[in-house]
Image (cartoon, grey):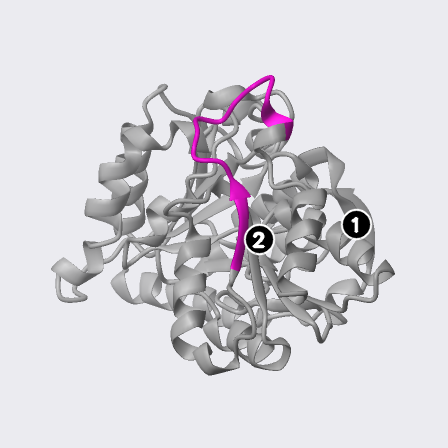
């Protein structure tokens, strides 16, 4: 029996390895236009279909969840593999860690990233340290936490937060944030199959707003590999998640004034791709980082410090950070809080003309 189980594990690992990672060109084959929540749904269908030890659970996921990302999963795979949990984020995370430690793929949903704080101890002191404290004898690498983050236009201070930087301070976790439907599907499947616990933040603003061609087949995109999505020579812009579309709009406006911007999607925040950002800054001599989270202690500060250390002699202007304000996330004043296109454009001009 043990031999048969070992063979099943080997076959499962081999089938995953055979899929490999997709390039942008490969990802365009047999694609259909869908939105981001549908891409997440596709990824979860594939994860459950290709691995019998994968489970999806969380608050209200059985009927589809608040954003309908898990629609149809319980009907197809059964209530023993797709099920609701009590309204207890600490319990969800603790159960997920135990399930993953037993060799399963635990895909847990925290309904809003704003609610992840009760689970903080489980994720930081248990999941992140599980392998290290056992000397690699045990691990919970099959753990993936999915959670929607960021502004949505009307969420206020309990449904709009961007808490990614809290987890970027924790060795042992991977933190991944997609910018689009195609990226979301490939990166989520990579997180689920990665041998390390991952936190996958989904930009809720884009669940229905972002639509693009997404391959119907099973594919993965590499973690810890940033993507240069716009080539430029005057300034480097770095962001992730929903902020990429805002940065891209600023790049277009800057181009009208003769400023060439290089735009990089970090995709994975921990471990982040320093080499790609460094290479770009060495070329342009200028850097702007933008994210929705408050500016103080945001991950943009880590990027800025790292680039200042490694590219100091190549920098031609102070590094700019255009981020959320150091306030609780407001409701009626959201438009003043957000790092908008105009704020970014002003910072681009100021940096380039420094």
Position of residue 40 measured from the top left corner of the image (x, y, whole percent): 62, 43
The residue at 48%/47% (across/down) is 200
Q: Is residue 238 magenta?
A: no
Picture quadrant of residue 194: bottom left
Q: Start and end of the magenta stretch?
A: 320-335
Quarter placement of the C terminus: bottom right
Q: Is residue 228 above or below residue 326?
A: below
Circle 2 is placed at which residue position? 240
Position of residue 235 measured from the top left corner of the image (x, y, whole percent): 65, 68
Tag 2 secondary structure:
loop
Q: Is residue 322 above or below residue 161?
A: below
N-term mark: 1 or 2: 1
Question: Which label lies toward us, 1 or 2?
Answer: 2
Circle 1 is placed at which residue position? 212
Q: Nearer the viewer, residue 323 or 219?
A: 323
**269 sits to left or right of 121:** right
Whether residue 215 is visible to the viewer of this picture, yes or no, is no
**351 sits to left or right of 231:** left
| Crowding near the residue tagged with mark 1, few <14, some 14–19, many ≥20 C-alpha atoms within 10 Å | some
Position of residue 26 measured from the top left corner of the image (x, y, whole percent): 74, 70
Residue 126 bears which disc, if any?
none
């Amino acid at each position: 029996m043990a031999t048969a189980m070992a063979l099943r594990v080997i076959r499962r690992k081999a089938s995953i390895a055979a899929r490999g990672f997709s390039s942008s060109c490969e990802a365009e084959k047999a694609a259909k236009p869908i939105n981001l929540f549908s891409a997440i749904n596709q990824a979860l269908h594939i994860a459950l279909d290709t691995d019998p030890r994968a489970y999806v659970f969380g608050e209200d996921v059985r009927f589809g969840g608040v954003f309908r990302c898990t629609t149809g999963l319980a009907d197809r795979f059964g209530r023993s593999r797709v099920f609701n949990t009590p309204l207890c984020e600490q319990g969800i995370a603790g159960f997920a860690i135990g399930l993953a430690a037993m060799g399963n793929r635990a895909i847990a949903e925290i309904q809003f990233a704003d609610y992840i704080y009760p689970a903080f101890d489980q994720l930081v002191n248990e999941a992140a340290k599980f392998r290290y404290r056992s000397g690699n004898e045990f691990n919970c690498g099959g753990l993936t936490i999915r959670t929607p983050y960021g502004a949505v236009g009307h969420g206020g201070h309990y449904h709009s937060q961007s808490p990614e930087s809290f987890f970027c301070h924790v060795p042992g976790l991977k933190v991944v944030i997609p910018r689009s439907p195609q990226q979301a599907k490939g990166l989520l499947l990579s997180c689920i199959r990665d041998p390390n616990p991952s936190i996958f933040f989904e930009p809720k603003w884009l669940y229905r707003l972002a639509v693009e061609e997404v391959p119907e087949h099973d594919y993965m995109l590499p973690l810890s590999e940033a993507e240069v999505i716009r080539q430029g020579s005057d300034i480097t812009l770095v962001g992730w998640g929903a902020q990429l579309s805002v940065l891209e709009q600023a790049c277009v406006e800057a181009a009208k004034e003769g400023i060439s911007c290089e735009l990089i999607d970090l995709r994975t925040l921990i471990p982040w791709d320093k080499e790609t950002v460094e290479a770009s800054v060495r070329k342009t001599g200028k850097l702007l980082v933008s994210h929705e989270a408050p500016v103080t202690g945001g991950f943009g500060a880590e990027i800025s410090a790292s680039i200042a250390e490694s590219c100091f002699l190549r920098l031609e202007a102070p590094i700019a950070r255009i981020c959320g304000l150091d306030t609780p996330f407001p409701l009626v004043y959201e438009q003043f809080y957000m790092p908008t296109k105009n704020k970014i454009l002003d910072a681009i001009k100021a940096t380039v003309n420094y």
